Structures are given as structure tokens and as C-alpha cells.
Amino acid sequence: IVAPYEKWQYYDTKVQQLEQDINYSVNKTKKVAWFVSNCGARNGRLQYAHQLQKHIEVDIYGACGNFKCSRSTADKCFEILDNDYKFYLAFENSNCKDYITEKFFVNALNRRVLPIVMGARPEDYEVSAPRRSYIHVDEFASPKELAEYLHILDRDDELYNSYFKWKGTGEFINTYYWCRVCATLHNEEQLRKPRWYSDLNDWWRGPGVCTTRSWRNFKARKDIISDSSDD
């Protein structure tokens, strides 16, 4: 039984944006932060971050960077994120369908920072998160292009704050795994149409579920910035 980490639910689907009385960029002097300990992720996230660093300030905390913030003082780390940084890299360690973890929900959306995501497909984030609450790397042809857009947001408080208008329009619904099991076992319609798989691993990791493609092969989905780059 597959269950998402969390899922966004609007109070009223007709109200997906609200004007905020908070300037989320005020007094923030730093650009991008990333808390990471696994430096060998096969989706090339660390390499992407290093390329991004060539065009915008990216402070990498943990084993893969030059900045330190112990997990034992997580609250202090998040306080730094809230007060000092405008953007956070919520990069998963694999690019797989529906694979969205606490890196996005807890480390980013629950903070006063704009997440930049890599991992699941853009359409997966669209059904799991509030509209216009994040930036997906697939929207840009290269790290340089992404950096150019982040610089635009950094200079334009109104545009930056538009990514926080989702706040107050709904809440994240936690998926309680055992409750899902119980509900499924009591669903008579599903029980009348059983499905089984001879190879669970093949079903779970079958063709198209995950991709090992390099970020260098990404193609922009949106014309956010017109200039292209071969970075």
C-alpha cells in the first residue's frame, strides 16, 4: 500500500491564494542554503548544486559542504534558515515518481523560505503541494538559468512574496500508514478485485518509475527565462 509522506488539502479549492501581511524577504542577506549529508546520490544533485554555486551564493551545510550545523541543534539550523536565507534546496537523493520526503515538507514548506526541488516529477509536486509554493529545477534548462531567475526574485520582493500566498489556504494532511492498511482491508470493492505481483521489486522499481538521467539532460518546461545555456 503506497502512501505519500504528506499531502496538501485546501480549505476551499476556490481560494488557493491569499494576500500576506508579511514580507518574507525582509532582513535576509543570504541566498541559497542546503542541509545535506549524503554526497553520493546518483541523481547528480551535488553536482547540480556545485554548478549552481558558480552563478549564485549557495551555502552547503553538512558532510558535503563547508558549513556546519549539527543535527542535534536542528531548531537552531532551521532558525538560521528562516532568518537568513531566501531559498532552500529540497533535493531528494533519487528522481522517482511520487518520491517527495520530509526534505520538502518539513525542511522547506514549514519554514519561511522558498524551496527549490529536485526528485519527483513536476506533476507529482503539483498534486502534493500548494500551487506556486516551490520552484522545480525541471523548469530551467541549466543551473545558470535557475540562478538567473533566483537573482530576479532576490531583487523583487513582490515577486518573491508571491510564492507564499498559499499560506493560510489549507493544511498538510499526514498519511497514517496503518490506517491506510486498515481502510484497505475493509474496502469490500477492492477486496473483490484483488491484484497480485509475482515480482514486487519489478513492480515497485519497474520501467519509468525512476530515472538515472543526468540533470544535464533536463529541458525547460516553462519559458520563465528566455536565454538558454549549455552549462
Image: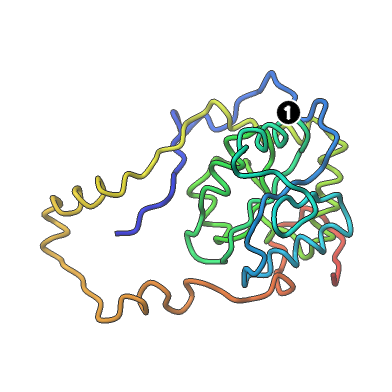
Q: In which quarter of the image is the C terminus?
A: bottom right
Horizontal relation, residue 16 to residue 231: left or right: left
In the displayed structure, would residue 62 be above or below residue 202?
above
Comparing 92 with 128, the one in front is 92
Q: In which quarter of the image is the N terminus?
A: bottom left
Residue 185, quarter of the rendered image = bottom left
What residue do we see at 52% from left, 47% from top?
A: 102
In the displayed structure, would residue 112 be above or below residue 49?
above
Residue 139 coordinates in the image, percent (x, y): 70, 58
Residue 161, quarter of the rendered image = top right
Kindly state the secondary structure of the residue where label 1 is placed.
loop
Q: Which amino acid does label 1 sit on?
A: Tyr
Comparing 186 with 228, the one in front is 186
Comparing 63 with 14, the one in front is 63
Q: How is the image coloured?
A: rainbow
In the displayed structure, would residue 149 be above or below residue 160?
below
Residue 182 coordinates in the image, percent (x, y): 19, 49
Horizontal relation, residue 99 to residue 87: left or right: left
What residue do we see at 25% from left, 77% from top?
A: 197
Q: Which residue is tagged 1? A: 24
Q: How crowded is mark 1: few (under 14 residues within 10 Å), some or many (20 or more)?
A: many
Residue 225 coordinates in the image, percent (x, y): 82, 55
Comparing 118 with 19, the one in front is 118
How many numbered circles does the render carry?
Answer: 1
